[in-house]
Amino acid sequence: MAADPATIDALLRAALDPSRLTVRDDSAAHAGHAGAASGGGHYEVLIVSELFAGHSRVARHRMVYDALRALFPAQIHALAVSAYTDQEYQSREASRDATRNSQT
C-alpha cells in the first residue's frame, strides 16, 4: 500500500521543520513498474530547511530518508529529493526567474 502524501508531509515537518515543503505523488506514472507491484509508491519531495545548513547533498538525503524510515519499502518504493537551505532555495528561484525573463 502506497503512503499517503499527507503522512510523508507530517513526518518531514516533524523531523526537519521546513520553511517550504511539497510532496508529489508520482505513483500513477509508474503503474506496471516492477517496484509498484509491492504496493510502494513513487514520490518527489522538495524541502527547504535550515537544518540542512552545513550538510552535503548526501547527508541531506539521509536526513529525509531517516525521517521516512518507517515507510520504506512497504509504502514508499522510490523517492526523489530536492533539499535546500532557505538561502539556496531563494538563489535557485532568483536564477530561474532571471532565466525566464531573459527568454521573453
Image (spheres, rainbow, N blue to C red):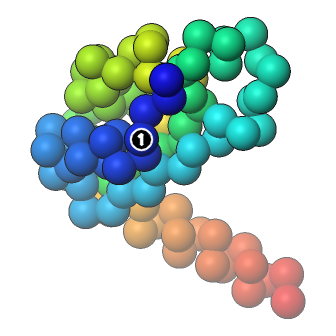
Q: Which of 51 and 88 is in front in this view?
A: 51
12 shown above or below 72: below
Q: Is residue 17 visible?
A: yes
Which residue lies under the disc numbered 1?
4
Would you identify the image quadrant in which residue 104 lies? bottom right
Residue 9 is situated, as x and y percent measured from the top left of the image, at: 32, 48
Q: What residue type is labelled 1?
A: Asp
Picture residue at 74% right of the left edge, 79% below the top: 100
Picture residue at 79% right of the left edge, 83% below the top: 102
Picture residue at 49% right of the left edge, 36% below the top: 81
Q: Which of 29 and 45 is in front in this view?
A: 29
Residue 84 is situated, as x and y percent measured from the top left of the image, at: 38, 49
Residue 66 is situated, as x and y percent measured from the top left of the image, at: 26, 21
20 shown above or below 33: below
Q: Which of 96 and 64 is in front in this view?
A: 64
Name the side, left or right, on which 74 lies relative to 63. Answer: right
Name the side, left or right, on which 39 lies relative to 99. Answer: left
Picture residue at 65% right of the left edge, 35% below the top: 27
Q: Is residue 84 visible?
A: no
Residue 94 is situated, as x and y percent measured from the top left of the image, at: 53, 74
* Secondary structure type for disc 1: loop
Total marks drawn? 1
